Image (cartoon, rainbow, N blue to C red):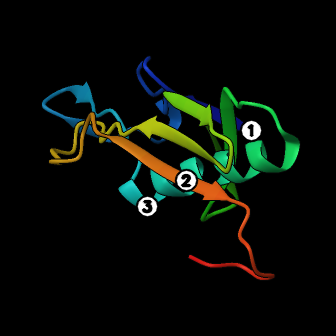
Amino acid sequence: MSEMFGNSQLQHHSTAKWRRGAALRHGYTTAACAAAAGAAAAKALLEGEVQETITIDLPGEKQVTFHLATCAMSNSSITCGVIKDAGDDPDVTHGAEIRATVGWGGTPGITI
């Protein structure tokens, strides 16, 4: 079952933790956001189409779908980004756009 992540609030009712009588909003790590951006950019490069969402696997056999804030193609690369939502956990990266750029290289193999 996928959970949707984007500009709307995250909904994790069954696993919500409580503080002062209110459910805490869950968020995602910067690494999860970077993985989503990278996967979206790679998929866009392979399919030749701008992506609007991307679903990635998380530990514990969970999947999450991220809405992309950006997904732009140039002649040689594609950049996709997601807006980081840290939930109710204070995080200096909350609200930052986490981007990844991929492109075809001149030599065989993968270069990071």
Residue at image mark 3: 31
Mark whose residue sits in front, 1 or 3? 3
Q: Residue at coordinates 63% horizontally, 39% vertically from top-left?
A: 74
Mark 3, residues whose alpha carbon is within 10 Å: few (<14), some, or many (≥20)? few
x and y, in percent, of residue 79 in the image: 56, 44
Residue at 49% x, 39% y: name it. Answer: 81
- The residue wearing badge 1 is 1
What kind of residue is marked 1? Met
The answer to which of 108 and 52 lies nearer the viewer is 108
Q: Which residue is mark 2?
A: 101
In the depicted structure, whether residue 95 falls above or below residue 15: above
User: Element type at marker 2?
Assistant: strand
Residue 53 in the image: state x and y as whole percent.
66, 31
How packed is label 1: few (under 14 Cα within 10 Å), some, or many (20 or more)? Answer: few
Question: Whole-percent x and y of residue 55?
Answer: 70, 43
86 up-or-down from 69: above or below: below
